[in-house]
Amino acid sequence: MSELIQFREYSKVELIDWMPRADAVPKDRVAQAARVSSGTEGHASERANTGLLKMLQRDRHGSPFEHVVFTWRVETPIFVAREFMRHRIASYNETSGRYRELEPLFYMPPRSRKLVQKGKPGAYEFEQGTDEQYEIVREHHEASAACAWHDYQAMLNAGIAREVARNVLPLSIFTSFYVTMNFRAFQNFASLRWAHPAAEVPTFPLYEIQQVCVGMESDVDELCSEMWDNFNNEGRRPV
């Protein structure tokens, strides 16, 4: 195996920016947006706004939540990025394998990742694999990455365009992208991509994308704790 090749068992999530900043706080911006129709956005008490935010979540009045926005940088395997970008409620910009040579960083499932799939489509259950099964997974991930990286480099060294040479790389290679998503959209994402114990509607997310969602949710919970509590208390149903 090439000494250049590296394996990582996890994705990385970094909060790049969020809005509103300055002297505003997210929950106040949502309350202001909700009250603008009546012209009372500057005159409500903290207690009144707390009640308003609960009502908006409970009764699924979602548009005021769109005025809080987050931007993350995500490093994750390509197969996770493709699952992510099925959500057409965000803006994306991704590393291009046409314009730059990709890095030899590949995903390796951690030992804690369940390997055995049972059930039917839409309702799969997963069980922990044996040590032997995990060794098979590790061995073939390493072999696939080594072979693909060798062939990729051979084509680049022969002067073949990056956009052609990248075709041999597996889905386990890491990519990175920026994603910008508002608070309402993130509720939708989180309701589908984390099988959370507070969720009233069951969901069956890919293990790896759930790990990304957990990282993003940590940022949202820190910045919007009161509103995120409301989301959880209402069964994690998006508005």
Image (cartoon, rainbow, N blue to C red):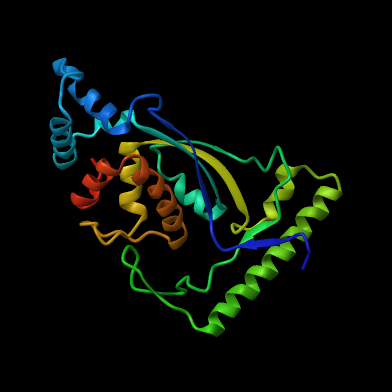
Q: Residue at x 13, y 39 (%)?
A: 59
Name the side, left or right, on which 120 lies relative to 111. left
To which quarter of the image does residue 64 belong?
Answer: top left
Name the side, left or right, on which 78 lies relative to 216. right
- Closest to the observer: 213 or 51? 51
Q: Residue at x 81, y 51 (%)?
A: 155
Q: Residue furthest right?
A: 158
User: x, y percentage for residue 173?
Assistant: 63, 56
Above/below status of 224 relative to 207: above
- Closest to the observer: 39 or 81? 39
Q: Residue furthest top?
A: 39
Name the side, left or right, on which 13 lies relative to 158. left
Q: Residue at x 78, y 60 (%)?
A: 150
Above/below status of 149 relative to 182: below
User: x, y percentage for residue 54?
Assistant: 16, 39
Quarter of the picture containing the C terminus is: top left
To which quarter of the image does residue 1 belong?
Answer: bottom right
To which quarter of the image does residue 24 belong?
Answer: top left
